[in-house]
């Protein structure tokens, strides 16, 4: 299991990650755009959003990483960071998911995606947002 901070932006992720890369002499490992996604009628992407960042990952140190993406909503200051949990098996992810969603708010159901076996986001009853990805 690996835990990484996940930063949420409103149309400024690419600019922020370029700054962070410069500041830390980091290695940009991923910068996927919404336009790179396979077409999905349940998740249409407007032409003006195709250059926004769907997912970015930046290696800051030997074992320190940050990830991030753009969203279409305004974030309060406390909503810009999520805890990203990457797991190799579905069972521990589902167990943790079911515990954290009790009294919380599911933001994106834990479900298969084009990039992972399972992915989802939940804000727990304490206001902490958790993103799960099962590879």
Image (spheres, rainbow, N blue to C red):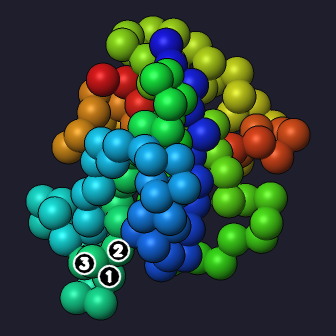
Q: Disc 1 vs disc 2: Cβ atoms closer than 8 Å?
A: yes
> In this image, 114 relative to 74: left or right?
left
Which type of secondary structure does the marked residue at label 3 adopt? loop
Question: What is the x, y in percent for residue 43?
Answer: 30, 67
Q: Which mark is residue 49?
A: 1
| Residue 54 in which image quadrant | bottom left
| Front residue of this view, candidates 88 and 5 | 5
Label 1, label 3: how far apart the Cα atoms are: 4 Å
Residue depicted at x 37% and y 10%: 89
Residue lying at the far bottom of the rendered structure: 48
Residue on which the image places disc 3: 50
Residue on which the image places disc 2: 52
Question: What is the x, y in percent for residue 39?
Answer: 13, 66
Residue depicted at x 46% and y 23%: 62
Residue depicted at x 33% and y 48%: 28
Question: What is the x, y in percent for residue 74?
Answer: 65, 78
């Amino acid at each position: 299991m690996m835990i990484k901070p996940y930063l949420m932006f409103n149309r400024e992720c690419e600019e922020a990650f370029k700054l962070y890369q410069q500041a830390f002499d980091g290695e940009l490992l991923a910068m996927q755009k919404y336009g790179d996604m396979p077409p999905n009628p349940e998740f249409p992407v407007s032409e003006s959003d195709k250059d926004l960042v769907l997912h970015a990952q930046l290696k800051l140190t030997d074992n320190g990483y940050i990830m991030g993406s753009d969203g279409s909503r305004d974030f309060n200051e406390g909503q810009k960071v999520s805890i990203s949990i990457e797991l190799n098996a579905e069972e521990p992810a589902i167990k943790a998911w079911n515990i954290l969603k009790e009294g919380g708010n599911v933001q994106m159901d834990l479900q298969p995606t084009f990039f992972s076996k399972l992915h989802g986001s939940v804000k727990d009853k304490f206001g902490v947002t958790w993103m799960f990805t099962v590879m």
